[in-house]
Image (cartoon, rainbow, N blue to C red):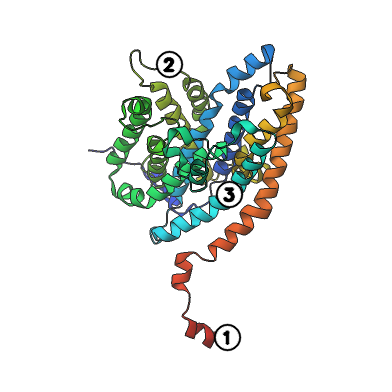
Amino acid sequence: MTAPVSTARVAASAPFAHVRNLPSLTGLRWATAMLIFGHHLMAVEYFGGPAGTVWAFVFEAGKTGVTLFFILSGFVLAWGFKPQQSAGSFWWHRFARIYPLHVVGVVLALIAAATLVPEIRTDGAAPLASNLLLVNGWVPDWWQAGNPASWSLVCEAFFYLSFPFLIRPLVRLTNRAKAVTVGVALALVALAPQIAALSPVPMSSASTPLLRLPEFVLGVTLALLVKSGAWMPLRLRYTVPLAVVGYALSEAPAVPGTDVHPGLAATVGFYALLVASLAVADARGRSTFLARPLWQELGRVSFAFYLVHLLVIASVSSAWPDGHPELPWRQAVTLALAAFGIALGLAFAMHKWVEIPAQRWLLRYDPARRANAPSVGAAEAVR
């Protein structure tokens, strides 16, 4: 028997079904992009000496920003789920959202590889074509073909393909079954490296889309629980420090003698709690700093920024031997700010002149819109 739900809680939860906009999650996208930016500054070794040690200590786990992107993606898509939307219409909207910028990112990567950053050059037409088609992540050796940052888009493309087949069964589950789904997803996150190691076909727990799917499913399931009022997360005063703990635990060692990583499950679980609590804050009208106009604008360009930031980081550092500056902290900060400024400028340009107009143009051909359009004869009669 489930515990009775108080009238006050029902009243507080009821409006969630009508809440469409979650601005704090848009702002969180920018904070997430900054984690990944910091991680790649570490990987390219902008900072040398003691400053490099400190930077690595802070941003080694920055790669988990991609995990946060995957959880956010599932949560936001489930929150805005429209039962009446066809799978074809959904896929077309997702295509319009990501593919134009993806193509631009690949073109910029080819230019960088041919000039300043030859180490990212893609050998062969097949891996390059697979990156353009967003399937290269299924072959571990090709995971960073084309634009190295776009490996995560391969995962997202698989998530988008799966979403119409996942969402309706998940919606129909009981709340208890949804809770079990959450537990299974977290268990699979911990087991993913072990699954990859034992798989008879080559797999990578980092880049094979199937092994990253539990993070997306977790976001979807929590959104359904929260929006229905069946479950409420902890308040932000608790989930923010828990997310910091999760960030640190991502580097925790595996269970001795295995490739099972409970620390990864903790990271994903605590990140998901943060996403859910930010959504609840927005739904209840409790503004967070992530909902402020500046963070909203930065959040909107975060996708473009993500696609170009590594190309810019590597291009700016290409003048140094092997592309690794390893500078004292003052010079490294100056160089990092230069890379940040260039990447942000490119991102704004791509958002304004590619992302928005291409998306608007492509959505004119949404299958749902065409299906609802008047026949030619009717259209002529209207004219």
Task: Name the side, left or right, on which 8 lies relative to 96.
Answer: left
As shown in the figure, which amino acid type bears the numbered disc 1?
Answer: Arg
Q: Name the residue under label 3.
A: 103
- Tell me the residue at 46%/80% (across/down): 375
Callouts 2 and 3 close, C-beta under 8 Å? no
Q: What distance separates the C-alpha of mark 1 from that of mark 3?
A: 38 Å
The mark closer to the camera, 1 or 3, is 3
Q: What distance separates the C-alpha of mark 2 from that of mark 1?
A: 69 Å
Q: Name the residue under label 2.
A: 253
Circle number at residue 383: 1
Residue 167 coordinates in the image, percent (x, y): 36, 49
Compare marks 2 and 3 and give the one earlier in the sequence: 3
Task: Name the side, left or right, on which 197 lies relative to 146.
Answer: left
Residue 14 coordinates in the image, percent (x, y): 42, 50
Residue 73 coordinates in the image, percent (x, y): 48, 43
Residue 283 coordinates in the image, percent (x, y): 50, 46
